[in-house]
Amino acid sequence: MTKKSLLAAAVVLATVMGCSTDAPRLTSQYRSSYDYYNFTKYHYNRDTLVEIHGNTLGLDAGRFAHAVTAAMNRPNSSVQSNFTTTPGPSAEKNFRVVLAFNSSPEGLGMCQAKGFTPTGQGGITILRAAWCWSDRADSDVTAYVTPVTSIEDPRFRTMVAQVTAELFPRRDENRDNDRDRGLRLGIMR
């Protein structure tokens, strides 16, 4: 991890820890290659492979994966795809979503990683997500929340659902040029 990445992580962590609310916080980053059209072309009403790394809740992998994909596929989601760890033939083989719960690497490294390392954050649950085309991340999101202790915790479902929506924004409300994206910080609703 570079000094710049460590400094950015420290600033975000200090900001999150200094807040008195339990509402999840997030950061998002979009590459110039990000295009919502690609999502609709390759994922709309189709299976999308989800890779899940880490397990902050101590559940078996199958039960945890089911809880994660259920939150990703929640009703009324603006993202219309079937997120699953076991995709059928409708899935586009080059695209996937990578999720890491309290694990690293992050951002661009998530699509290229051969292994993930647990990061003992203590006092905070971190979910990192990337939308990958092969080994390239077109978008990535990191969410932070005070420790989630159960898949029944509403903050768990909210965090996963909001991260999913943030990975595939229709447009960037803060920029006129939809292709020029940078870092966004915000409170998840």
Image (cartoon, helix red, strand yellow):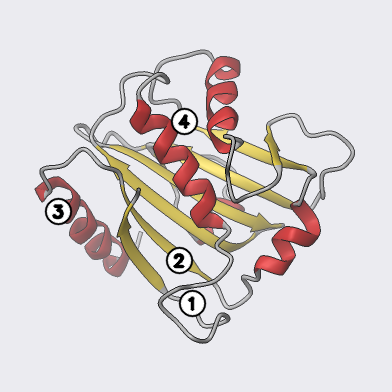
| Circle 3: residue type | Ala
Q: Counting residues from the N terminus, which is met first, the one under dot 1 or under dot 3?
A: 3
Q: Residue at x 31, y 59 (%)?
A: 186
Q: CA distance from mark 4 to mark 2?
A: 22 Å
Viewer-nearest of discs 4 and 1: 1
Viewer-nearest of labels 3 and 4? 3
Q: Which residue is mark 2?
A: 29
Quote the CA–CA distance across marks 2 and 1.
7 Å
Mark sitting earlier along the chain (4/1):
4
Can you identify the residue that label 3 sits on? 14
- Separation of disc 1 and disc 3 at Cα? 24 Å
Q: Compared with residue 166, is residue 59 higher up or lower down, i.e. above or below?
A: above
- Residue 41 appears at what percent x and percent y? 80, 61
Q: The residue under label 2 is which amino acid type?
A: Gln
Mark 3 vs mark 2, CA separation in Å:
19 Å
**Image mark for residue 181:** 1
Q: Earlier in the sequence, mark 3 or mark 2?
A: 3
